[in-house]
Each structure stands twice: as C-alpha cells, then as structure tokens.
Amino acid sequence: MTSDEKAAPRLSLRQLIWICLGAITMALIISTAFSMLERGYVTQAMVRLSRRVLPAQEQVAALNTAYVDQETGQRGFMLTADQAFLTPYNAGKAQADRLVAQIRATLAGDDEANRRLDAVVVAGTNWMTQAAEPQIAARRAGSIPPDQLESMTLSGKRLFDEVRGQLSALGARAGELIAQQLRRVHAAQRMANIVQGAAAFLLLAVVITAVWLLHRFLTRPVNSVLHDVTAVAEGDYDRAIRSAGLREVAVLADAAETMRDNLRANTTLLLDAERRDEQARIAADLHDRTIQRVFGLGLELTSAAQRRSPDLTRLVHETDRIIADLRRIVFNLNVAANPSDDAVGLCNAIIKVVEDSATDLGFTPDLEFSGPIDDRAPLGAARTETLAVLNESLTNIGRHAQASAATIHVATLDSQLRLIVRDNGIGSSAVDPGDDLRRDIQYRAKQFGGHGTIRTAGDDGGTIVEWVIPLAYRD
C-alpha cells in the first residue's frame, strides 16, 4: 500500500449503504415527481376537454337548434297564421339568448370563438329585425298576397342562411378546439410515458451502480481478504494480507496482517529457541562428556609419557589439538545458541577467515577465544581492520612461511582486544615482504590507539603477529 493510499480516508460500510440508499431514494423521488407532473398535465388537458371544449360544442349545437326552431316557427306562422307556431319561435329566441351567454362563458379567453359567436349574434339579430319580426307583424295584421309572401320568404331565407353560415363557422371553431385539446392530451400522455420510461431507466441505472459499488468496495475486498487469510491459515505465512475496500474491511485486513506478522515472528522465535536449545544440549554433552574424557585421556598420556615412554609425546600433542578443536566447536555452538549481534558477527567472521584460509595453507590453524569477546568486541572500522590483519597474516604464512601449523588466539584482556597469530615456519627474517607488513600493521593499529608487531617466535622458529587495540574504540 502506498503512502497516498494510507493517507486517503477510506469509505465506511455505513457511508456506502447511505450512499446507495440515498441514490435510490433520490432516483425514486425524481422519477415520481416527473411522472406526477406529466400526469398532472394529462389530467389538466382532460379536464379542459371535458369541462370546456366538449360542453362548448354541445352548446353550439343547441344554439343551432334554437335558431332553427325560431325559423321553423316563423315560417309556419307565416303560412298558417296559427299562433301555435309562435311558441317554438319564442322558446328558441329565449334559448338562443341563454346559450349565447353560456358559450361566452365557456369559451372565455378564445378570441376567435368569441368573434365567431358575435357574428352569429349579429346575423341572428339581422334576421329577426329585418325578416322575422316584421313578417310576423305583417301576418298578424291580415292576409298577405302570395307574391308578397314569396318575396318575404326569400328575404327571410337569405338572412337565415347567413345565420346558418355563422353557426357553421362557430361549430367548426368548436371542432378545432376539440382537435387541439385532443392533441394536447395525446402529447401530454406521450410525454408522461417518456418521463416514466426515463425514470425507470434512471432507477435501473442507480440500482446497477449501487450493485457495482457494493461489489467494488465490499464483496471483492472481502473475498480478497478471505483468500489471503485462508492461504495463511493453510500455512503460507509469507503471503501478505492485502488491505483494500471499505474502512471496516481494511481494519480487519490490517488486524489479520498484524496477526500474521506476530505468528511469523513467534514461529521464528520458537524455531530459534528450539535450535538454540538443541545446540546448547549438544554443547553441554560435548563439554560434559567428550571433552572431559579426552582431557582425562590427555592427562593420562602425559603422565605415562613422563613416567615411561617419550614416544607418547606426539599423542599428547595430538590430544591437546583435539581438545582445542572440541573447545572451538563448543564455543561455536554456544555462540549460535546465544547470539549477540556485535560479538557473534566478529567471531563468525574470524572463523570464516580461518576456514577460508585452510585451502591455501594446506592445514587448518588452531583457533582459541578467550574472554568476553561476544560482549566487548569493537565495531566498524576497528572490526574491519582486525579481520584484515588476520587475513593478511594467514596469507603471508601460506605464501612465504612454509609452515605446517599455526595457532590463532583472540582474547579480551585489560580493556584490549588481542589477536595473536603464530606459525612454525621459517621466521620473519626470511620473509621478503616482512618489513612492509610490519609497517602496515603498526600504522593500522596506531589509528585506533593500539600497536601491532611482527617478531620471530624464538629458537623454535616461526613468526608471531600481534595486533592489540583498545576495546573502547567504537566508531
């Protein structure tokens, strides 16, 4: 996980649920609001159609009937002079006046319909004032000659045709209004269907998005953590438990990862403890049994050599070397069983240098450690130079000393680290690079406040390299 991912706030499960529910609720509210709005338009259009336009058409038809009744009654009275024919005339006149007022109220706001209604009223008034009323008055006064009656009938018919024409125009306008309102109803219905479909699509998109969010931030991270935890539970302790998804899932993953780290650490500590216990047991067995027995054998051989045969001296020396080797093995086992980063690093490094030099030397030097080297060995450059001096000394023995044996003694004494390398070769006087090596060792030791020397071992021959530096030096 990157630092940016750690710093970025994670979404919680509660927040995700509220986001999904909020989005779905908002989609429902929006879709419902638009659907209700469009349905309201449809309802308004239907109400206008049923309460204004259709009644207006019916009123126009009734007005046409009222004028026809007037014309029929007027013509009947003119032909028969029977007062009964004036009843539909008078009733039609009253009905026409009432219907004109109703139509004006119904079609209020429609200028074209009112203009055509005014034309009907004017035509009707012209017919009544110029034909119907004068002709009725004349007929009441007495009989009318046939030629004059025919002329009156033609005149009245001409004027009433004008009334019919205006009524037809008014009826056509009512039909236009009905057609317009039906188109509005259909348009509103179509828009309502579109809005309803869009709302359904929006709701479906929101639901799909909510499902994707749940899969992306909940289901998939939970499955990932489950797979990692299962793998760790089956023994794959090196598999990291990835932290992803919601805050709660990430917290669980981090807790599981912490448990995995603790499990690995505890397992490692347990294995190390078991290994150290085994090494300590082996070291104790070697020390308590093997070394003591070999040491006892050496004492017996020494006593026998002093009392009886000088030929046992070689066996005594060999026994001493075996004891030294066993002590080194025991020391290494104890170091491995009780590790210390500083001391173990130096001791292991010295052992490795000695083991690496065995091939070039043709033999393995004897190695002895004395004192608390594990706890007090210097670090850094002092440690590096100590190993370098040891390596160069062994290299010099292998190239020039013609030795068959060598001993290395590392000790901490009087607040000093002492490294002594001794061989049984031809001595430093016969070694050409001896002076350069001596000056180099002396120079290196002075850097740390110590001293380094190379000298001949004595009558037995060989060379002694001594390297001494203070234990207190730590860079």
Image: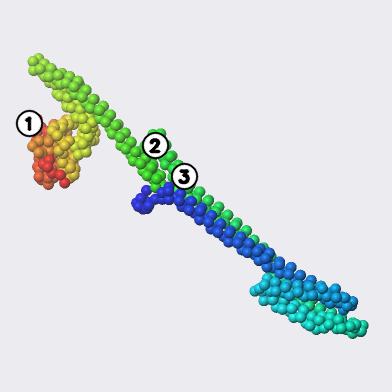
**Amino acid identity at mark 2:** Val
Return the residue nearer the eye: 291 or 112. 112
User: How are the residues colored?
Assistant: rainbow
| C-alpha gap between disc 2 and disc 1 | 68 Å
| Residue labelled with disc 3 | 219
Marks 1, 3: nearer the viewer: 3
Q: Tell me the tag on residue 293.
A: none
Front: mark 2 or 3:
3
Q: Earlier in the sequence, mark 1 or mark 3?
A: 3
Give the residue displayed 30% in from the left and 37% down from the top. Answer: 265
Determine the image quadrant of residue 456: top left
Give the residue drawn at x 13%, y 44%: 473
Residue beneath the point at 13% across and 33% down? 371
- The kind of residue on which mark 3 rests is Thr
Dot 2: within a 10 Å radius of its alpha carbon, few (fewer than 14), some, or many (20 or more) residues? some
Above or below: residue 458 compared with residue 380: above
Query: In front: 290, or 241?
Result: 241
**Separation (CA) of disc 1 from disc 3:** 86 Å
Expressed as whole percent of the image width and height from the top left, the position of residue 204 reads 55, 52
Q: Is residue 245 above or below residue 366?
A: below
| Mark 1 residue element | loop
Of the image marks 2 and 1, the number of the one nearer the N terminus: 2
Q: Where does the image place residue 62, in percent across and percent down from the top left?
A: 76, 70
- Marks 2 and 3 sit apart, C-alpha to C-alpha, by 20 Å
Q: Which residue type carries mark 1?
A: Asp
User: Tag on residue 459?
Assistant: 1
Callout 2: helix, strand or loop?
helix
Residue with the most extreme right position: 146
Q: Relative to the observer, which residue lies in front, 361 or 386? A: 386
> What secondary structure is found at the residue carrying circle 3?
helix
Taking the image as drawn, is residue 46 in sight?
yes
**If you read the primary sequence from the N terminus, does the residue marked by circle 2 or circle 3 appear first?**
3
